[in-house]
Amino acid sequence: MPLTLEDIAALSGTSRSTVSRVINGDHAVRETTRERVMTVLQSLNFQPNLAARGLAAGHTRVLGLVIPMGVSTIFTDPFFPMLIQGVSSACNACDYSVMLWLAEPEFERRTISKIFYNGLLDGVIVASMLTDDPIIEALGEGRLPFVLIGRNPSREQTCYVDVDNAQSSRQAVLHLLRLGRRRVATITGPQNMIGGIDRLQGYQTALRERGLPILPELVAEGDFTEMGGYIAMRQLLRARPDAVFAASDMMAIGALRALTEAGLRVPQDVSLVGFDDIPAAAHTAPPLTTVRQPTQRMGALAVETLIDRIENPTPEVCHLVLPAELMVRESCGTSLGLFH
């Protein structure tokens, strides 16, 4: 059976309340008494119930990380493990623990109840890309501090951390245009996700700046998965693009497969650019030009921002938008003149 405070009190010749005060760092306990209790604790390798101690003190030093996506998506898209690593490392550095919820859409309401009523969390990070998410709405109506990873246009009074999706996508498409490409297609992310919306906006902005039309036949919606990119690229082949900007690396990898099956060479026939810079991007054939977003840094900043909100209940609303970097590799090639 696990040791209780009463057991420790009996072994140290003190009371239960005295043992509790020692465990909780009460400096009013006499030094000789504290040493007796600590000697017993150390000899028995006693580990106090941190959750119970935190609840009694009004805080737990536990943060929740909620990802409202299906489990299969989370563990097949390298973006999410990189994000989780950033959150976990920052929590460890700040002496916090993290509880992870993978909230599949059909179970979101159940997840909301667990977040609000388990009593174990000091705050929540929500990595939601959806423009309309019931978890975010519920948190907005409650008192639990929370921070978003991903901008939400309907929650402008909420702290969030995000990458500049529109600007970095614009730069990627402008790079293709500077290489002489003119029929630049895009495989977008889902248009109910702000990342998908903003990256499409960046594509459109780049074309307008160069005086090029936005042609519907050069736009295909994907779902951020490899298969989604493959299907979208098969659709785009009919429009004969000479370049493709895919709104995620996973979709770019799927697009690369579709192009290869169609007998088209990358980059000689079609240049290809992705987004994320997942580890596999540098090892495709050819290596994928892509937008590197600071995914782990986003997770760490979300933790730091949330802890600030926990320790300072009335902080200013902060919107942290990080720049991204275009990683130029072989899949977009050089100028067209060198291919002909």
Image (tube, grey):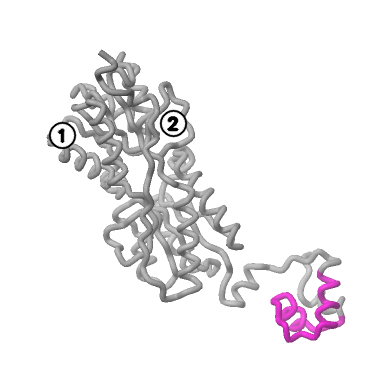
Q: Which residue is mark 1?
A: 216
User: Residue 267's quadrant in the figure?
Assistant: top left
x, y percentage for residue 286?
41, 22
Which of the two labelled residues, at mark 2 and mark 1, occupies the earlier sequence position?
1
Asked whether the viewer can see residue 225, the reply is: no
| Dot 2 alpha-carbon crowd within 10 angstroms: few under 14, some 14 to 19, many 20 or more | many
Q: Closer to the camera, 269 or 69?
A: 269
Q: Residue at x 27, y 24 (%)?
A: 234
**Helix, strand or loop at disc 2?**
helix
In the displayed structure, 68 sits above or below 13; it is above
The amino acid marked with disc number 1 is Pro
Of circles 2 and 1, which is in front?
2
Magenta span covers which residues? 13-41
Characterize the magenta stretch by its predominant secondary structure: helix
Q: Residue at x 85, y 79 (%)?
A: 10
x, y percentage for residue 197?
26, 46
Q: Is residue 116 covered in magenta? A: no
* Residue 295 numbered tag: none
The amino acid marked with disc number 2 is Ala
Asked whether the viewer can see residue 158, the reply is: yes
**Helix, strand or loop at disc 1?**
helix
Is disc 2 in contact with disc 1, using a CB cutoff of under 8 Å? no
Q: Which residue is mark 2?
A: 281
Q: How far is mark 2 from mark 1, CA to CA?
A: 28 Å
The C terminus, quarter of image:
top left
